[in-house]
Amino acid sequence: MPEYDLLVIGAGPGGYHAAIRAAQLGLKTAVAEMGEVGGVCLNIGCIPTKALLHAGDQLHDARAAASFGLHYPEPKVEISELNRWKDGVVKKLTGGVGTLLKANRIDLYRGAAHFLDPHTVAVGETKVSAQHIIVAVGSEPATLAGFEVDGQQVVDSTGALQLPDPLPKRLLAIGGGAIGLEFAHIYNNLGCEVTVIEYTDQIVPGADQDASKALAKALSQRGITISTGTKATGLSRSGGALTVTLEAAAGGQARQQSFDRVLVAVGRKPRSHTLNLAEVGVTVDARGFIPTDDRMRTNVPHIYAIGDVAGAPLLAHKAMKEGLVAAEVIAGKASSMDAVAIPNVVYTTPELATVGLSEAEAKARGYSVKIGSFPLSASGRAMTLNDTEGMVKMVSDAETDLLLGVHIVAPHGSDLLGEASLALEMAATVRDIALTIHAHPTLSETLLEAAENVHRQAIHIVNR
C-alpha cells in the first residue's frame, strides 16, 4: 500500500494549492480526485462561466457600439462554436494543473475516496496511507423541492453551462445570488428574456444594501426582470413550456408565468456525505460542513478540511488560502487562517465587488460609521468606456478613520478590489487611500474620490 506524508482528497483550487505547497516544502504528497483536476471551479464553475460572460459582453458591446458611431452587421451567435471555445479554455487550464502536479512529483489517484481508518483512504480500488490528510471535496448545487433537475428544461449551474441550440426564449433563474445573476446576465446578453426571483428582499443577500440596489438597477436597465421577496412554489409542464407558480415570500396571491427553461440557483451544499467521516470520528455539523480551527484542523488532529466543505464563504480564493495554510501547518510552519476580510465578486456587468463590512454589519458591531461614495456617472474613464452605471462606497469608523469595508459596482470592479483588500489587510485608514496618487484617467480614481467623500472633500461631485 502506498504511503505518504500527505494525502489531499480533492484536486480543486484548495486541494491542488495544498498539494503543491506541501510538495514545495518537502512532503511526499498524493492527491485523490474523482473527476477532473481543477474541481468545480475550473471545470463547471468559475472559469467556464467567466468565458461565457465575456462572450456575452462582447455581443452586447457590439450592439451598443452604434451609440458612439460604430456600426456592425447584426452579430450571429454560433452556439456550438461558443460551447467549443468555452470547453477549450477549461481544457487548457485543467491540463495546466495536471502538469503542475507532475512537475512537483505529486501522485494523482483517480476515483471516489472514503476513509477506511484514520490514516487509510480507499480511492476506487486502491488503498492509500498517509500521516496527514486534507479533505478538499468541495460542494455541489443545492436542490429545490418541486423543481427536480432534468438537465434539459430544469437545470442547475452545471446544466446551464452547456448552452442549448436553439437558446430558450424565456429563462427563469430561481435565486438572486452570484450564480443566478451571472447566468441571468449570460442568457440575457445572448438574447433570452430573463427573470430572476430572490426570496429575500435584495439580490446578492448579505451584500451592502446600496451596492445591491445599484447592481439591481444596472441589470434591470440591461433588460433583466428582477423580483425580490418572491418564491417559486410549483412547476407544471404543458406542450414543451414550463408554467411556474410564483408568490410573495411572505405569502399572498399566487401567479403563474411561463418559461422555456428554469435555472435552480438556490445555493450549494458540501460533499462530505461520501467520505465515511463518522468512521474516523471527524465532526460534521447539521448542514454537512466540517468545523475547523484557524489552522484548518478538524477535531481529529491529523485530518484537515479546506474550501467549501469547511464552510462559508464558498469561494475558490478562500479555498486556495486555506489550502496553503493547511499544507504549511502540516510541514511545521507557523501558519494560520487570519484573513481580515475575504473579497467577494459577482461577475455581471457591472461587477459587484465587495470586501469587508457592509454599512449594516459595521453598525451592528457597534462602530460609529461614516460613509463615502462616488457614482460611476461622474467618472471620466467610465464615460470613455460608455459604461457609467454603478458606484463605489466606503465604510469607515468615524472615530479612528479606519477603513472597514469597500463596495464596488463598476466595470472591472473585481480588478479594483485588489487595492481595497490590501488596504483592509494593512489596517489602512480612509485618509491613506485619499493620500495615494491614482493614475488619471482610470476607474481606480473612483476609490480615491469615495475616500475623499468620506471627509466631504471629493473633487468631482458635490459633497453631501
Image (spheres, rainbow, N blue to C red):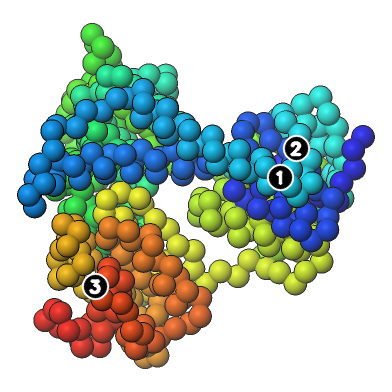
Q: Earlier in the sequence, mark 2 or mark 3?
A: 2
How crowded pointer 1 is (Cα within 10 Å; few <14, some 14-19, many 20+) is rated as many
Q: Which of marks 2 and 1 is nearer the N terminus?
A: 1
Q: In which quarter of the image is the N terminus?
A: top right
| Mark 2–mark 1 distance (CA, rounded to whole Å) | 8 Å
Instruction: Using the image as rendered, state which of residue 13 and residue 138 is in the foreground.
Output: 13
Verify CB contact (< 8 Å) between mark 2 and mark 3: no
Verify CB contact (< 8 Å) between mark 3 and mark 1: no
Residue type pointed to by label 3: Pro
Q: Which residue is drawn at 36% across and 52% down?
A: 346
Report the residue marked by disc 3: 441
Instruction: Using the image as rendered, state which of residue 300 and residue 336 is in the foreground.
Output: 336
Verify CB contact (< 8 Å) between mark 2 and mark 1: yes
How crowded pointer 2 is (Cα within 10 Å; few <14, some 14-19, many 20+) is rated as some
* Res 134 visible: no
x%, y% of residue 381? 21, 67
Q: Earlier in the sequence, mark 3 or mark 1?
A: 1
Q: Quadrant of the C terminus?
A: bottom left
x%, y% of residue 101? 71, 45
Residue type pointed to by label 2: Leu
Tag on residue 108? 2
Report the residue marked by disc 1: 101
Q: Quadrant of residue 59?
A: top left
Instruction: Using the image as rendered, state which of residue 444 and residue 13 is in the foreground.
Output: 444
Residue type pointed to by label 1: Leu
Total numbered badges shown on the rendered structure: 3
